[in-house]
Image (spheres, coloured by chain):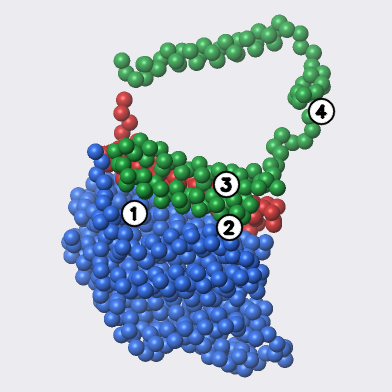
Chain colours: A red, B green, C blue
Amino acid sequence: MVVQTESFVMLSIVLFVLGAMGVLLRRNAIMVFMSIELMLNAANLALVAFARYWGNETGQLFVFFVITVAAAEVAVGLALIVAIFRSKRSINIDELHEMKG
Amino acid sequence: MSPLQEFAPIAVLLIIAVLVAIIISIISRLFGPYKPTSRKVSPYESGMKPIGSASRRYSIRFYLVAVLFILFDIEVVFFLPWAVVFRDMGLYALAAMGVFTLVLTIGLIYEWKVGALEWE
Amino acid sequence: MLQLPSLETLNMGAALPAISIAAWACILLLIDLWIPKDRKILTVYLAAGNLVFAFIANLLVFNQSGDSFMGMYVADQFSGVMNLIIIGTALLSIVLSFDYLKRVGIERGEYYVLVLFVTAGAMFMAAANDLILIFVALELLSIPLYVLSAFRAPDIRSEEAGMKYFLLGAFASAFLVFGGAMVYGATGTTNLNEIAASAGMIIASNSSTSLFLLLGAALLLVGLGFKVAAVPFHEWTPDVYEGAPTPVTAFMSVAAKLGGFGSLLRILVVGMSAVTMTAGEPAVWQNVVAILAGLTMIVGNIVALSQANIKRMLAYSSIANAGYILMAVAAAGSPGLANEATRGALVYMLAYMFTNMGAFAVVIAVERANGGADLEHFVGLGKARPMLAIMMVVFMMSLTGIPLTGGFIGKALVFATTLNAGLVWLAIIGVLTSVVSAYYYVRVIVNMFLRDAEASTEEATPGYSTGVQWVAAVALGGTVLLGVLPTLITVLTDRVSLVASITP
């Protein structure tokens, strides 16, 4: 049984939209962050599916870089979340309102 | 035989396993004695009285370790495909991976020197 | 047997300026560990020395166009001019930072290393000819900027700025990656030249593949729109600019825009210029970019009117300026106008760089002397520190676009190419919003000269330190020189031709 490229792409679009909705609707910084990861991995899925469709490795190569860069983002993001938590005792992004104008 | 049919025995096995588990718990409930006391229904924690919430806060140090781990964990993504084709590519691949490892090592030395690896 | 690229085909020499900065940043990270805390000025010199080296190296390879890394990196005159502006920004902001970091007690060598990484990222972005490299370079630009925004760490405003910038920046890069995936899906390649070669045919076929290509292009536009703070993706800008340490705000308001527009121009002009409904017509993305440009100019300038904090005002002004540059990008969609529009955008960005760095230098000086960057803190500056006030006048005039300043030359070129592209309505919006912007820029001047401080002018702290003084002076020189003798830069930008690089 061969899954069609279209199915993969449809799934990746669904995942991407779910991730985007998570970013917009969730209030917990870690949850927002995980939603962003979901969006990135949706893109990875599409890239791998397209790489199989075209029969070249460029898509898979792209995925490697996305994974690595996402790890770097995780590192910086977790560090920022820890720093915010230390000063505010909360990671609810609605409470980030020191600046208004 | 279609791929779905190949998996049919496994599906049967799964169904049987679930059914057996349900039937056994129903039978033991029906025929066994059932006299609950507060001590019997409370969760068992090595004889200690269970106190506090189940989701405890972890020390922030664990996050630091996790962050450092992720960075050096992901390098495998590049090492693995490199190792697969390494023999075909020879010295060139060795040099390229050397540069990559060098950058990682710089990061490690930095981490070490600023004391991120110390637990206290 | 695998096909191996030889060292000659890698041609790393053409990418030397960017590579030298990235490599030196890694080494400097280590060197800095052994520099004692009270001698961090050494790190500044080491970082600045590297930037000067890259600047000279860039001038040397300026006329040698060539591909590096198998077509991923294109060293042409466009990236040459961009590199000059980016390195200049980094140099000015490093000089600007040293006193500030000392004053607020965050004097750490990592700061300069991070600035170098951002610089390298922006340079790679301007030269990237492949979606993969564009993504990696964008992250090399963004991730250190998240850290820099939060660099004043126990300060909650700075941490908030870092967090907001991080969440929205990561959100934006997810869009960029997904857009890249869609474009790859439609064309089977991530190389911009190869995308350009097949894009026209795909659009003409009008199949589902063309849908993927358009979706991908739109998502790429969203991702880069976040980076350059174009409306409606600008929400993060004012908070981040206000909360971040002021030298970082100065740096990122220019560097992130330079990188973003560098990639945007390459993607749209090199990769997507053939995306037209019928040959000879403007590219399909022209209208979208033009609407974005119009919205960005309107919203940026109108909201700036009501800002009492100068850092926030400059944030909205930077949004508005992104709109003017986007105008040039839109004009680049018309056939035959790509080069003219690109040159206009480059001159505009150079003028914006000088003016903005100068304005922020004055803001830092005022923050230091009067303890804040609200409009109130500028009252009476004309009497207390006339030199500083006069410099600010020039920067405000340049941001408005008054003749004899760099801002005027930039705007004139951008408006001219927009009119040539037939986007008259957009040019009208541009002129009208420029007039509106005069109100809030002039308000700063009025506050400095025509209002007297209520007796509270204690003549105590010196308004500006040597570093800030130097940056303001250099920025002033650049702004005026560009306004009086624009040929100095157009002689370089006239050699820029993005489109020529797509014909093999």
Rendered image quadrant of residue B93: top left
Q: CA distance from mark 1 to mark 2?
A: 27 Å
Report the amino acid beneath label 1: Leu
Q: Is residue A15 left or right of residue A25?
A: left
Q: Are the residues tagged 3 and 1 within 8 Å (C-beta)?
A: no
Q: Seen in the image, is C326 located left or right of residue B40?
A: left
Q: Which residue is mark 4?
A: B49
Q: Nearer the viewer, residue C223 or C467?
A: C467
Mark 4 belongs to which amino acid?
Lys
Determine which residue is flagged by label 1: C131
Comes first in the chain, label 3 or label 4: 4
Residue type at mark 3 is Val
Q: Which disc number belongs to residue C66? A: none
Residue C195 seen from this side? no
How many other residues sit within 10 Å of disc 1, few (<14), some (14-19) or many (≥20)? many
Label 1: chain letter = C
Frontmost of labels 3 and 1 is 3
Q: Are marks 1 and 2 in contact (CB under 8 Å)?
A: no
Q: Where does label 3 land, which residue?
A: B67
Secondary structure beneath label 1: helix
Q: Earlier in the sequence, mark 1 or mark 2?
A: 1
Q: Are marks 4 and 1 in contact (CB under 8 Å)?
A: no
Q: Residue at x 21, y 52 (%)?
A: C198
* Residue at the spot 77% in from the left edge and 21% down from the top edge: B41
Q: CA distance from mark 4 to mark 2?
A: 41 Å
The tag on residue C163 is: 2
Quarter of the C terminus of chain C within the rendering: bottom left
For the residues labelled 3 and 4, the Cα–Cα distance comes to 35 Å
